[in-house]
Image: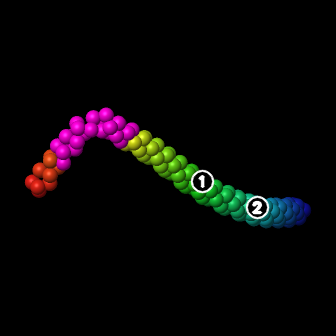
Amino acid sequence: MSDQKTNGNKDSAKTAAKQSAEEVKQSAEDLAKEAAETAQASYEDLKAQIDVLKHDMAELSAAALRAGQYSARDAAERVRKTGRRAVDHASDQMEHATDHVENMLEEAETFTQQRPAVALGLAAGAGFLLAIAMTRR
């Protein structure tokens, strides 16, 4: 009887060991399956994040391009405004010079009418000095 009992214990230990092995095997399979699903989900999440990053980079590049275009337009507009101011300033200076020359001519005419002999003497002297200067060259 003790042999039967020993054999029974051995069989029940074998059965328990088999059952434990099956449970461990099933747990390992479940864990492997879960790890594969997690890896697949992580891969899909990573792929989605990369797609979002690609989209964001494209938008950032477009925004940088637009900013560069606006900067170029702003610079061109500043150059145009500066050019207009320079032309306006030159025009004002030319008008001022023209007015000044006209005033001087009017004063010369008035002086010549009031003192014709002095004006004639000054003109002769200026002509003489000009002739000397021209002949020395």
The stretch of residues the image draws in magenta is 103-127
Marks 2 and 1, how far apart at CA: 43 Å
**Residue 52 found in image quarter:** bottom right
Closer-to-camera residue (28/116): 116
Q: Is residue 14 left or right of residue 133?
A: right
Membership of 124 in magenta stretch:
yes
Q: Is residue 62 left or right of residue 72?
A: right
Q: Quadrant of the C terminus?
A: bottom left
Kind of residue at disc 1: Tyr
Assign a secondary structure to mark 2: helix
Give the residue drawn at x 59%, y 57%: 69
Q: Earlier in the sequence, mark 2 or mark 1?
A: 2
Task: Quickly name the residue at label 2.
Answer: 41
Task: Judge by depth and name the residue closer to the eye, 8 or 104.
Answer: 104
**Residue 70 tag number:** 1
Q: Quadrant of the N terminus?
A: bottom right
Of residues 21 and 100, the one nearer the viewer is 100
Residue 43 coordinates in the image, percent (x, y)? 71, 63
Left or right of residue 73, residue 56 in this image: right
Of all residues shown, which one is farthest toward the top?
114
Residue 104 in sight from this viewpoint: no
Task: State whether the magenta stretch is mostly helix, strand or loop.
Answer: helix
Q: Is residue 113 magenta?
A: yes
View extreme (left): residue: 136
Look at the image and tell me whether residue 127 can be seen: yes
Front position among marks 2 and 1: 1
Amino acid bearing label 2: Ala
Rendered residue at 30%/38% (across/down)? 112
Q: How is the image coloured?
A: rainbow
Residue visible at 27% across and 38% down? 116
